[in-house]
Image (cartoon, helix red, strand yellow):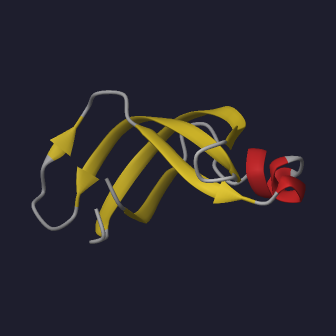
């Protein structure tokens, strides 16, 4: 979706980085324990995956793997 949504997410763990062959870029993925959508207050307690693009250099450094930590609470803008 083109429209961003603001959420508060509880991070479970980073599950890795891989190459997106369709888009031709590297991406990292974390799994959440829960998300609250700020505009509606809706709570999702199911496991959600958050993915974001990174350079190959970022993927192999703390900028990729260390961006989100276990049990970190963060406010993010996401797209579905």
Q: Quadrant of residue 28?
A: top right
Q: Quadrant of the N terminus?
A: bottom left
Q: Position of residue 79 (x, y in %)?
A: 35, 60
Q: Residue at x 31, y 70 (%)?
A: 4
**Relative to 72, 61 lies left or right:** right
Residue at position x 71%, y 38% in the image: 17
Query: Who is closer to the viewer here, 19 or 72?
Result: 19
- Picture residue at 28% right of the left edge, 27% below the top: 46
Q: Quadrant of residue 56?
A: bottom right
In the rendered image of this protein, does residue 33 appear above or below residue 28?
above
Residue 63, horizontal then vertical, whole percent: 79, 58
Residue at the spot 39% in from the left edge and 49% down from the top edge: 9
Q: Is residue 2 above or below residue 70?
A: below
Q: Nearer the viewer, residue 41 or 64?
A: 64
Please state the total of marks drawn on the protein image: 0
Q: In the shown orientation, is residue 9 left or right of residue 56?
A: left
View extreme (bottom): residue? 3
Q: Is residue 59 left or right of residue 5?
A: right
Q: Nearer the viewer, residue 61 or 80?
A: 80
Residue 24 % position (x, y): 68, 52
Quarter residue 78 falls in: bottom left
Extreme residue toward the front, this view: 22
Where residue 69 appears, x then y in whole percent? 65, 44
Q: Is residue 75 above or below residue 23?
A: below
């Amino acid at each position: 979706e083109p429209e961003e949504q603001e959420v508060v997410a509880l991070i479970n763990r980073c599950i890795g980085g891989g190459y997106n062959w369709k888009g031709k870029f590297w991406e990292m993925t974390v799994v959440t324990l829960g998300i609250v959508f700020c505009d509606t207050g809706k709570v999702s307690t199911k496991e959600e995956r958050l993915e974001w693009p990174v350079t190959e250099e970022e993927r192999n450094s703390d900028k990729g793997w260390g961006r989100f930590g276990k049990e970190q609470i963060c406010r993010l803008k996401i797209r579905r």
